[in-house]
Image (cartoon, coloured by chain):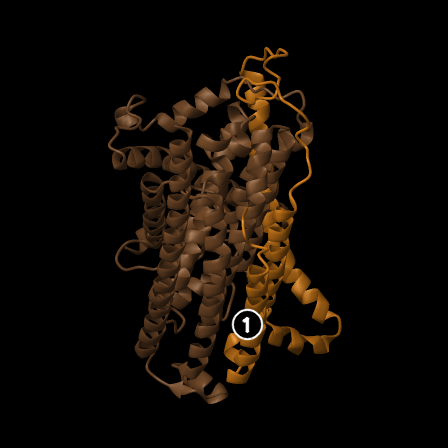
């Protein structure tokens, strides 16, 4: 059982030992090992991308009562390869009026920064690119770099549709970073560290953790993080920056061939990054019984991605004013209130005797603390939803009344003309 | 290896170690990200070049025109952004900086008592008040 559980770590250690044997201990060996690990990270990210394009097309097709790709290979599993061949052999035109370097570099930057997200993800115990002590912060910082690349693509194409897509990027992607940021903070607070390994250990109960994933403790934060993550990566139903029925294809109208492929790759990797981050921050990452750890991470990530596909397959696109209102007038205030609530609850109800001695509060059992956190988070969520649904219903009724008045006025005009 | 503030303070007695130790930790921690950046740039940067070599290249004037659904483009594309977007970006900066200021507090959460938490709550409430003001002024209404 240990062999299977440590498979990935042992392979990595074996390769590292072989290279040190070959080159001797030193800078050269370090750089070669890091380069191989970097290639492995890239392979995981792009392999995930290839698998997910197929899975998404197949599953969304099933949701919408279609068949999906079924020609290339058995059940169409070779579809990603067929797509790659097609894109590689497609002529790659650059518009004459485009800003050459900005236009050429944008797809590369999208894909590179999406890959960089995976450098800090712990795949299994001891299998992590680099265990940064600011891991969670690094994810946010790298995630916002793709916004710049999308803005570059939209602006550099010198196309009005692209520019509209870039404009929307500014408003949407930039805005949804705030709730993402504010909902990672409670996780860091309850862990006391920004390192992703520490966050996972806190949830799996290795070093005196709760042994409960954070989604149980903070359902509201988890939900807000997931939704703002979907909006941040610009996936349907928040795909306003590439809304094909409104602005053709948004910021990537002018891209063809493999440059388009790279933009797709960057987008999928970003979405995959959000799914991985959600499973690390709120679902306990690689922690889980019976199955080997890396399999747990894959299963959890795929589970989260399944939710993303499900949303994409079912929901219509939101309007931009709805999108922005939902962010600034719902998620941001709610996240701040949630943050303050968790901050104060965590100081009033303490389960760790050492902390109780240092800071005071009310000493209770860990499971009671989990229940208090979870229940108050859920209560806040239900309260907020109740308030918002009432408000939205009122707005809709007012809107309907205005429409009705307009219709009556039109009828009167029509009657007068007869 | 960890370089928590306590570590650094303890090691500060050894003169320059105060600066050098965190820098050393950074070198080993962040080197991998640098290597990944280079590897990813190489692997991804080669893709458009390969595409250029493999695919047929027969550009002509019509192909290189701006694609706007067959219509000829009218006027300049690179116009000024509307002030509305600027407002959103400005409020984003406010919240982003505020959020970043909360990160160090979140890491040090276990060593703060209830009073410290109340002080930080006041800071968060100030942010919320600023947002409320912006909403009331109509800065966040999309038109």
Quadrant of the image occupied by residue A153: top right
Which residue was labeled with disc 1? Answer: B125
Q: Which chain is brown?
A: A
User: Which residue is rendered at x = 34% and y = 46% of the image?
Assistant: A302
Crowding around mark 1 (Cα neighbors within 10 Å: few <14, some 14 to 19, many 20+) is some
Relative horizontal placement of residue A103, taking residue A272 as reference (left or right): right
Q: Is residue B54 above or below residue B117?
A: above
Q: Is residue A265 above or below residue B23?
A: above
Per the rendering, the colour in which chain B appears is: orange
Q: How many marks?
A: 1
**Visible residue check, residue A23:** no
Decide which of A30, B94 is in the foreground and name it.
B94
The answer to which of B130 and A393 lies nearer the viewer is A393
| Chain where mark 1 sits | B
> In the rendering, at what x and y percent does residue A397 appear?
36, 53
Q: In this rendering, is residue B40 above or below B97?
A: above
Horizontal side of residue B94 vs B109, given as left or right: right
Identity of the residue drawn at 67% across and 23% down? A97
């Amino acid at each position: 059982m240990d062999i299977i559980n440590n498979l990935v770590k042992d392979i990595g250690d074996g390769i590292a030992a072989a290279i040190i044997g070959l080159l001797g201990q030193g800078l050269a060996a370090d750089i070669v090992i890091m380069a191989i690990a970097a290639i492995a990270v890239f392979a995981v990210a792009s392999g995930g991308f290839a698998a997910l394009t197929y899975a998404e097309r197949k599953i969304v097709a099933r949701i919408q009562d279609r068949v999906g790709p079924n020609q290339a290979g058995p059940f169409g599993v070779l579809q990603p390869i067929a797509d790659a061949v097609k894109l590689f052999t497609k002529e790659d035109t650059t518009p004459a009026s485009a800003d050459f370097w900005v236009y050429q570099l944008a797809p590369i930057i999208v894909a590179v920064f999406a890959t960089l997200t995976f450098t800090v993800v712990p795949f299994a115990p001891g299998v992590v690119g680099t265990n940064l002590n600011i891991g969670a912060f690094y994810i946010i910082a790298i995630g916002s770099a793709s916004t710049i690349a999308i803005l570059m693509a939209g602006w550099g194409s010198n196309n009005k549709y692209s520019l509209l897509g870039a404009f929307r990027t500014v408003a949407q992607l930039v805005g949804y970073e705030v709730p993402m940021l504010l909902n990672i903070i409670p996780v860091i607070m309850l862990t006391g560290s920004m390192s992703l390994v520490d966050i996972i250990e806190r949830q799996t109960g290795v070093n005196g953790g709760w042994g409960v994933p954070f989604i149980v403790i903070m359902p509201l934060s988890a939900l807000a993080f997931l939704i703002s993550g979907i909006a941040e990566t610009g996936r349907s139903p928040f795909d306003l920056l590439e809304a094909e029925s409104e602005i053709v294809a948004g910021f990537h109208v002018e891209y063809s061939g493999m440059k388009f492929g790279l933009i797709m790759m960057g987008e999928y990797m970003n979405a995959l990054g959000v799914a991985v981050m959600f499973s690390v921050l709120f679902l306990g990452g690689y922690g889980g019984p019976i199955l080997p750890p890396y399999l747990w991470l894959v299963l959890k990530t795929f589970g989260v991605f399944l939710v993303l596909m499900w949303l994409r397959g079912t929901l219509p696109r939101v309007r931009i004013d709805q999108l922005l209102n939902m962010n600034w007038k719902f998620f941001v205030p709610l996240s701040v209130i949630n943050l303050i609530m968790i901050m104060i609850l965590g100081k009033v109800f303490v389960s760790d005797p050492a902390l109780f001695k240092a800071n005071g509060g009310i000493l209770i059992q860990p499971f009671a603390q989990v229940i208090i956190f979870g229940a108050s988070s859920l209560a806040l969520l239900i309260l907020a939803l109740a308030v918002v649904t009432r408000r939205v219903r009122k707005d809709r009724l007012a809107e309907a009344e205005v429409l009705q008045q307009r219709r009556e006025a039109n009828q009167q005009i029509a009657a007068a003309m007869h | 290896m960890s370089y928590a503030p306590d570590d650094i303070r303890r090691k500060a007695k050894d003169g320059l170690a105060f600066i050098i130790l965190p820098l050393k930790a950074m070198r080993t921690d962040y080197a991998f990200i640098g290597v990944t950046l280079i590897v990813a740039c190489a692997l991804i940067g080669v893709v458009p070049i390969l595409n250029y070599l493999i695919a047929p290249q027969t550009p002509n004037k019509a192909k290189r025109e701006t694609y706007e659904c067959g219509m000829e483009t009218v006027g300049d594309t690179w116009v000024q952004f509307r002030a509305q977007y600027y407002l959103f970006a400005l409020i984003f900066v406010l919240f982003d900086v505020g959020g970043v200021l909360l990160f160090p507090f979140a890491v040090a959460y276990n060593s703060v008592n209830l009073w410290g938490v109340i002080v930080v709550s006041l800071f968060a409430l100030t942010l919320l008040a600023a947002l409320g003001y912006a909403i009331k002024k109509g800065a966040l209404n999309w038109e």
